[in-house]
Image (cartoon, grey):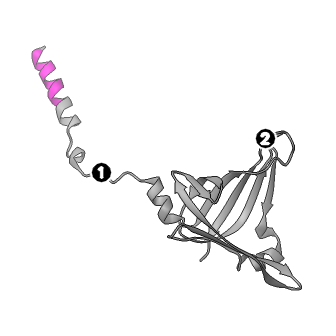
Amino acid sequence: MKKLLLATMAGALFTACGSSDDSPQPPKPNPEKDYATLIIGKWHNSRMDVIYSKKGNVEIKDFTKYPKYDICRKKSYVEFTKGGERIERNYNFREGECKIDSVASVKYKLEGNRVIIGDEEGQILKLTDKELVVISDERDLDEDGKPEKNKFYLVRVK
């Protein structure tokens, strides 16, 4: 019985302590640091979902489905700079061509998965080198006393 117990313990010891346990582990991702690096650059707004609080209905505004918008979308962008500035340049289709509509600049900062732009705040749902998805509160559109949500889908400018 002692031999069986010793053999079992020795087997457990050898299988529990493999050489792979000593290998270095990859660093754990730091989302806040990754967000600060990944958000830098120019982005096109490709879609916006308005999520109504009253019934949960979703209104999808897919900007890529409008040919005239698509022409101007190639010029319009939102840019996040390393210096903490968010620059938005919008073009609209007027008189047969894309014309500058507005240029706005405001400070932004990241806190965890939140992006604070001026006095507005959004939650980053997805941020990769190609895609940014942010959700934020909107004014009460359906008059139920609760704010609606806007979900923005942006793609990186190439």
Q: Is residue 155 left or right of residue 95?
A: left
Density class for disc 2 (Cα within 10 Å; few <14, some 14-19, many ≥20) is: some
Q: Quadrant of the C terminus?
A: bottom right
Place of residue 109 in the rendered image (x, y in percent of width and height, measured from the top left) = 55, 59
Distance CA(mark 2)–CA(mark 1) = 46 Å
Q: Residue at x 83, y 77 (%)?
A: 68
Find disc 1 in the rendering and name its residue.
Answer: 25
Total numbered badges shown on the rendered structure: 2
Identify the image quadrant of residue 53.
Answer: top right
Q: Residue at x 82, y 45 (%)?
A: 57
Place of residue 144 in the rendered image (x, y in percent of width and height, measured from the top left) = 85, 39
Residue at disc 1, secondary structure: loop
Numbered tag placed on residue 146 in the rendering: 2
Place of residue 47 in the rendered image (x, y in percent of width and height, measured from the top left) = 73, 62
Instruction: Return the residue nearer the eye: 22 or 100.
Output: 100
Give the magenta part as a residue range: 2-11
Q: Is residue 143 left or right of residue 91?
A: right
Numbered tag placed on residue 55 in the rendering: none
| Amino acid at circle 1 | Gln
